[in-house]
Image: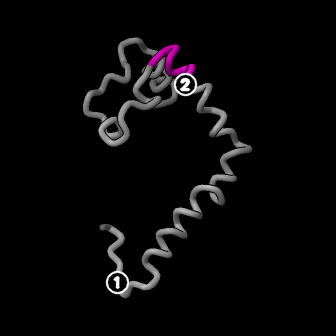
Amino acid sequence: MGYDAVKTILNSKIFGVDIPFRASRQLFGRTIMDVDGEEHKRLRLIMSQAFHPNVVPGYADQLIKPVIQSVVDSIKHKTQVDFCE
């Protein structure tokens, strides 16, 4: 499947977001991935600011490293760790 086929599907009125058993919906509830049309465009405009190329690099220090540090701190004194758990 190439670019043109994907573009056709994404722009088609036949295909939409109404997939009742989508895993993301079961995990997170209704998200921007669950709306089409004007509502999707409106939410995308709001969300796009958070994903601007000038903003994303800061997430490593602001969001990701603190979570990693918290995990490391919680296991650093353990002699055995199950990462799958």
Prevalent SS, magenta region: helix
Q: Name the disc covering residue 80, or none.
A: 1
Quadrant the C terminus occupies:
bottom left
Q: Residue at x 35, y 35 (%)?
A: 29
The residue lying toward the viewer, choosing from 53 and 72, is: 72
Q: Name which residue type carries label 1.
A: Gln
Describe residue 53's horizontal placement relative to residue 46 as left or right: right
> Which span is picked out in magenta?
36-42
The residue lying toward the viewer, choosing from 15 and 45, is: 45
Q: Residue at x 66, y 34 (%)?
A: 49
The residue lying toward the viewer, choosing from 56 and 9, is: 56
Where 78 falls versus 63 (above or below)?
below
> Which residue lies under the disc numbered 2?
43
Farthest bottom residue?
79
Which quadrant of the structure image shows residue 35? top left
Q: Residue at x 52, y 62 (%)?
A: 67
Q: Name which residue type carries label 2.
A: Leu
How far apart marks 2 and 1 lie (CA) works out to 44 Å
Quadrant the N terminus occupies:
top left
Q: Residue at x 45, y 19 (%)?
A: 36
